[in-house]
Amino acid sequence: MVNNLEYRSTIKSKPYLFLETKKVASLILQGLNEYEIKEKALKENIFQVNTESRKREIAATVIKRIKVLDEYLLQKLANGPIETAKLIVLYAIMKTDRLFFEFMSEVYREKLILRETHITDKDFSLFFQSKREQSETVASWNEYTFYKLKQVYIRVLYEAGLLKNKKGDREIIKPVVEPDFAKHFQENGDKIYLDILLGVK
């Protein structure tokens, strides 16, 4: 359960990583294991980054996210429509990042439920303030951390296709979810994530 995870701010240096996650899903389906993928990242620079530390960081992050996906979702991510693949990466981030999950549940979903069309700077401020009050860990973070988290959350939502624009009052886009994709979430006990994406109470 995501509620068992600690609050972390590491997403600010490890954002959406869509192409990287899609690539690793394909490698897993080809039969590569975690060690082989990390070796490939280091020796072949499959993520096309400059430093060894960044190669390791991306590999570790993507593998952690991939581990929450079952065979069906791996196949959909590697070979399915790009819109669905993007939602699967977003789902993997929600499953592995408690604060982002709570943002999606408490801000994004609420906006859809209330039929509000934009996510504003004030929404971020109120969300982070409420988390400061609920968690000593979050309260210990400095202002720059929240500034970076806000930037990354906006970027993730934009790249996932859930925001129309990144600046100003950001217009929300409600995703179109494939019927079999929705059914899979309902059957595997992860309906909460589908409800978040679709704005269901």
Image (cartoon, grey):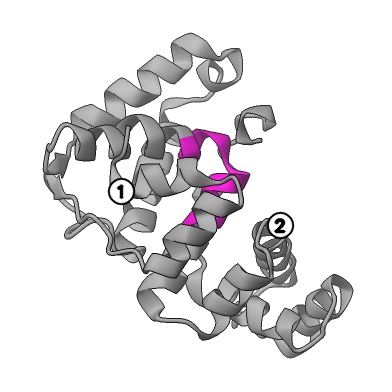
Q: Residue at x 74, y 79 (%)?
A: 28
Predominant SS along the magenta part: helix
Judged from the image, the secondary structure of the residue bearing numbered disc 1 is helix
Residue 116 as seen in the image, left or right of residue 56 = left
2 or 1: mark nearer the eye: 1
Is residue 96 shown in magenta?
yes
Q: Quadrant of the C terminus?
A: top left
Which residue, given by chain and number where applicable, does mark 1 sit on?
Answer: 198
Task: Tell me where residue 98 sits by quadrant.
Answer: top right
**Is 177 situated above or below 74?**
above
Front residue of 67 and 186: 186
CA gap between label 2 and label 1 equals 25 Å
Which residue, given by chain and number where applicable, does mark 2 sit on?
Answer: 64
- Residue 185 visible in rendering: yes
Q: Residue at x 29, y 60 (%)?
A: 158
Instruction: Say the numbered circle drawn on residue 28.
Output: none
Residue 71 as seen in the image, left or right of residue 199 = right
Task: Tell me where residue 123 sits by quadrant.
Answer: top left
Query: In this figure, what is the number of numbered marks?
Result: 2
Q: Over which residues does the magenta segment extend? A: 90-101
Judged from the image, the secondary structure of the residue bearing numbered disc 2 is helix
**Is 31 situated above or below 200?**
below
Residue 85 percent across, percent down from the top left: 46, 72
Residue 184 as seen in the image, left or right of residue 195 = right
Is residue 57 shown in magenta?
no
The answer to whether marks 2 and 1 mark residues whose Cβ atoms lie closer than 8 Å is: no
Q: Quadrant of the N terminus?
A: top right
**Is 61 situated above or below 124?**
below
Mark 2, Cα crowd under 10 Å, few <14 / some 14-19 / many 20+, is: some
Task: Tell me where residue 86 sits by quadrant.
Answer: bottom left
Front residue of 145 and 198: 198
